[in-house]
Image (cartoon, grey):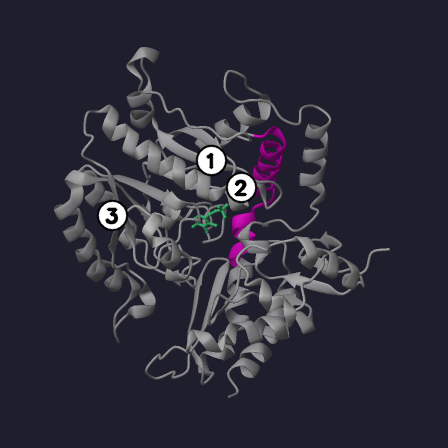
């Protein structure tokens, strides 16, 4: 017999949950989920939760999507997995062809991995190895932005700057060059986000002049630093960065793991700056939240620097067991089919406008410093002091109060610190957005009351 309490207890007896202080669950109940349906998650007692965070930003076309289900089921009866070294299969080839087609110009090669952090590791290693193959082994460092996040494995953590995840492990990490970023929340009165981007780019310019000789690549999250509290910046920064990297002989890695596949209003965020990176990391929405898969897209110049006789030992000898898993590739292909047939980007534009309107009233809230939005990501920054933008002390866990309230109302809103955000599956309706806005408003009122 399966019910909420039963699964809850069995879970806490054996599981160790991600990104969780397990002691919290002495007072904070786990939410056991029995089934999903579109934007909804349902527990064992029939209570439903609107998945406003796309189950950690992965789900883009709803849970148990009939079209993706059909594709994965068909693949399951054909080929579940095969080694991708020395062997190949149709879904991996077809997906690579389509990714080459839809990603920015010049990205003509696809290297698979099985999660986002692994894709970042691949891009870092490939960049380093490219320079080494060219005889430039003095290039060993990476430049990243303040407040950046690129995953949790040691290499990925090394190029991140969110202290909550990084600080403890600092003694284990390589030392990256962290440059103050273009976060538009820090704008001065009268400044536009493009002004901030240009002003802050001076730091990058200085770091590149000083460190280009020892730097493999600059890694950024285009337009939105999602794990860094959904801080946003202007595409101008990416244009300047692309040009400066070219001038200085440094690669540009675009980590589109969270922002790719339509989140920012275009299929890929780099499109808004009209740039092509040297490496583009993709995961999360790639399979619409179905199965773990990642891809690193790169261009022919990189590929050719590894292409030689075996004895010259220039090959990229990196692998993951589930590289290019056929089931995951079939989910990704079905995802791209939906983008193609449903005019998703245009429909999202309407949903995004609706999302902005639905929370516009919160602008005047005494504890809301900013509502910011880029495409299908909307964030509301709660502060102790609105005029001076003084944040709440993190120990007060105001966001957690919003989370708990939302659960009672049937919504999964999982704030990042004091930032409440919507990053819903694209199958959400305007009415459901209104419901989220109501729940968020109630939650913010409650969380900022004292
Ligand atoms: C989630 C995320 C990653 C890491 O992906 P995982 O699959 O969780 O390892 C890397 N970069 C960005 C920008 C992300 O949002």
For marks 1 and 2, the one nearer the N-term is: 2
Is label 1 in contact with label 2 (beta carbons under 8 Å)? Answer: yes
Classify residue 89 by image quadrant.
top right
- The dot on residue 295 is 1
Residue 328 magenta-drawn?
yes
- The dot on residue 286 is 2
Q: Is residue 248 above or below residue 147?
A: above
Asked whether residue 104 is in view, the answer is: no
- Residue 46 place in picture, x, y as percent: 80, 63
For marks 2 and 3, the one nearer the N-term is: 3
Are there few (<14), some (14-19), or many (20+) residues within 10 Å of tag 1?
A: many
State whether the magenta stretch is mostly helix, strand or loop: helix
Is label 1 in contact with label 3 (beta carbons under 8 Å)? Answer: no
Q: Secondary structure at mark 1?
A: strand
The one nearer the camera, 131 or 349, is 131
The one nearer the camera, 295 or 149, is 149
- Who's the residue at 17% across and 42% down the image? 212
Residue 242 magenta-drawn?
no
Q: Secondary structure at mark 2?
A: helix
The one nearer the camera, 121 or 185, is 121
Q: Secondary structure at mark 3?
A: helix
Residue designated by label 3? 241
- Who's the residue at 39% across and 77% down the image? 391
Q: Is residue 127 left or right of residue 17?
A: left
- Residue 85 place in picture, x, y as percent: 50, 20
- Residue 141 place in picture, x, y as percent: 24, 42
- Who's the residue at 34% across and 59% down the image? 147
3D distance between C-alphas at marks 2 and 3: 26 Å
For marks 1 and 3, the one nearer the N-term is: 3
**Region of the chain picked out in magenta, as a range:** 325-349
- Who's the residue at 59% across and 68% down the image? 24
């Amino acid at each position: 017999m399966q019910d909420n309490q039963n699964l809850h207890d069995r879970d806490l007896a054996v599981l160790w949950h991600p990104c969780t202080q397990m002691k919290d669950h002495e007072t904070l109940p786990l939410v056991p989920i029995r089934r999903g349906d579109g934007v909804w998650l349902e527990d064992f007692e029939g209570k439903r939760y609107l998945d406003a965070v796309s189950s950690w930003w992965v789900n883009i076309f709803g849970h148990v999507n009939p079209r993706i289900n059909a594709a994965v089921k068909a693949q399951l009866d054909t080929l579940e997995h095969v080694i991708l070294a020395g062997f190949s299969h149709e879904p991996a080839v077809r997906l690579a062809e389509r990714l080459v087609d839809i990603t920015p110009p010049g990205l003509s090669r696809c290297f698979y991995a099985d999660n986002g952090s692994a894709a970042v590791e691949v891009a870092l290693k490939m960049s380093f190895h490219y320079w080494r193959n060219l005889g430039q082994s003095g290039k060993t460092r990476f430049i990243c932005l303040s407040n950046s996040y690129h995953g949790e494995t040691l290499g990925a953590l090394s190029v991140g700057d969110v202290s909550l995840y990084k600080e403890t492990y600092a003694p284990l990490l390589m030392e990256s060059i962290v440059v103050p970023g273009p976060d538009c929340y820090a704008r001065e009165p009268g400044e536009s986000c493009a002004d901030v981007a240009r002003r802050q780019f001076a730091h990058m310019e200085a770091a590149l002049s000083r460190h280009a000789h020892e730097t493999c690549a600059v890694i950024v999250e285009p337009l939105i630093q999602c794990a860094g509290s959904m801080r946003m910046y202007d595409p101008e920064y990416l244009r300047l960065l692309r040009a400066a990297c070219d001038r200085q002989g440094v690669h540009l890695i675009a980590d589109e793991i969270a922002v790719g596949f339509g989140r920012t209003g275009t299929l890929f965020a780099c499109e808004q700056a009209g740039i092509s990176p040297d490496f583009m990391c993709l995961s999360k929405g790639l399979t619409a939240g179905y199965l773990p898969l990642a891809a690193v897209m790169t261009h022919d110049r990189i590929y050719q620097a590894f292409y030689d006789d075996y004895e010259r030992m220039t090959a990229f000898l990196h692998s993951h067991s589930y590289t290019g898993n056929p089931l995951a590739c079939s989910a990704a292909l079905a995802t791209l089919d939906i983008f193609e047939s449903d005019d998703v980007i245009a429909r999202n534009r309407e949903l995004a406008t609706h999302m902005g309107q639905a929370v516009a009233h919160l602008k005047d809230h005494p504890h809301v410093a900013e509502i910011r939005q880029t495409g299908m990501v909307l964030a509301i920054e709660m502060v102790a002091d609105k005029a001076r933008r003084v944040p709440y002390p993190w120990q007060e866990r105001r966001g957690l109060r919003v989370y708990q309230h939302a659960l009672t109302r049937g919504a999964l809103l999982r704030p990042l610190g004091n930032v409440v955000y919507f990053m819903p599956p694209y199958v959400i309706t305007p009415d459901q957005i209104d419901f989220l806005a109501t729940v968020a408003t109630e939650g913010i009122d409650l969380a900022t009351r004292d």
